[in-house]
Image (cartoon, rainbow, N blue to C red):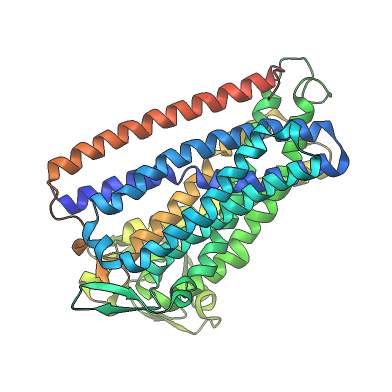
Amino acid sequence: MDVCLLSRIQFAVTIGFHFLFPPITIGLAWMLVIIEGLAWRRKDPVYDQAGRLFGKLLGLTFAVGVASGIVMEFQFGTNWARYSKFVGDIFGAPLAAEGVFAFFLESVFLGVYLFARSRLSRRGHWLTILMVAVGATLSAFWIIVANSWMQTPAGYTINAAAGRAELTDFWAAVFNPSTIIRYAHTMLAAVVSGAFFMAGGAAYILLRSRREGALTQDAGAAPLARRALEVSLVCALVASILVAFPSGDWHAKQVARTQPEKFAAFEGLYRSQENAPLLIFGLPRDNPQRVDAYVAIPGLLSYLAFGDAGSRVRGLEEFAADEIPPVWLTFISFHNMVILGTLFIATSAYGAWRLWRGRLFEGRRFLWMLVAMVPLPLAACQFGWMAAEAGRQPWIVYRVMRTADAFSSNLSAGEVLFSLVLFSAICLALLGLYLWLLVRTLRRAAAGSSPE
């Protein structure tokens, strides 16, 4: 068994599990800023009830996210000691900023938001959820800074004698070539996740309502679910479009400029081409190097990457064999993310059309579709993360440090395997508990229980 491979699998498991919760936390917090704002400005008790219910789900999601995040961060020291030593001078700064300036802001105001509702004015209560959303968004910024530096490192020098990278320009490292666009793309994806989470929860409540005709009458929990569904679908439509255009388009252009081998792997482009085609579908193969069963639009990849259909796009043939990322995993992850993004636009647009026509609450099939959609934005986030990280390989810090040189060499394969099995079991238990509490809360709301 390979210690490096096992350490990579363990980190993928723990960060993949953790990354289920921050998108919901960030997106749902901003949904609640809107819901609580409407409750305050309109003095509407229905919006207030919706805020109470989904605020409770926000607290639950935040708690599980914090628990899973602690395990993830400890691995930098236990499983990736050589990496931590090499980049600690740079990597530690954004992680410290995330904890000091963002996490405490988010967690303190979340406690006030959840437990001091009756002691605050409506404006004060709205300000608490606004600060939660701002704190969550700032927290994500510093995490994106750290990861973006690994993708496009800047503001550093290599101290060969000490065997480490050292920070020379803090702001150059923070605002490296990929930070801002990756941050915007990730935050919009989080809003999509939070919006579909709220929409699916509201749809589930409507479907579970026990009173006859609750889908169309102001009875039981139906009013709060209807208001939440209206707000979340409109937000989902706006955010889904912005994820694709302009943020997704800008991000692709940035990758084409700064990580050309990753960009080539995204599109299965084995050979450099002018008028390079954009693959809508395909199955990449490495031996021999080709893409089977492909459907492509000629020239569109060159145009999207460089603004000119005749532009030359570098293929994987131009790079050393030991510097090419795993093409199949990168390609499939990227295209699955794009397919899901298209589905989100179509679904939210259809929902907005039904809302405009006054038919949003009539069809049970569409409501069940919204329930089924809840995990899909999270899957898209996971695919995006996989495409970004797999596409950077074999580098842990792009063209600075290889992944094979970064893991803790003093660990045995058995030790890593044991912790991998243990962490996987803990993640499954936490996920099961989270889903059980989530469904129980929604069922109680549908049955008419108070969301207090």
Residue 48, position in %: x, y? 77, 34
Residue 168 vertical placement versus 197 (above, below): below
The answer to which image quadrant residue 196 occupies is top right
Residue lying at the far front in this picture: please name it. Answer: 119
Residue for point 57% across, 21% down: 440
Residue 366, position in %: x, y? 67, 35
Residue 132 vertical placement versus 358 (above, below): below
Residue 278, position in %: x, y? 48, 69
Residue 188, position in %: x, y? 60, 56
Which of 312 and 428 lies nearest the eye of the viewer? 428
Residue for point 85% across, 44% down: 41
Quick check: can you spot residue 362? no
The answer to which image quadrant residue 222 occupies is top right
Residue for point 84% across, 23% down: 217
Q: Quick check: 318 left or right of 253?
A: left
Quick check: can you spot residue 181? yes
The answer to which image quadrant residue 214 occupies is top right
Residue 114 vertical placement versus 5 (above, below): above
Residue for point 62% across, 44% down: 109
Q: Quick check: 426 left or right of 219?
A: left
Which of 431 and 207 lies nearest the eye of the viewer? 431
Residue 223 vertical placement versus 354 (above, below): above
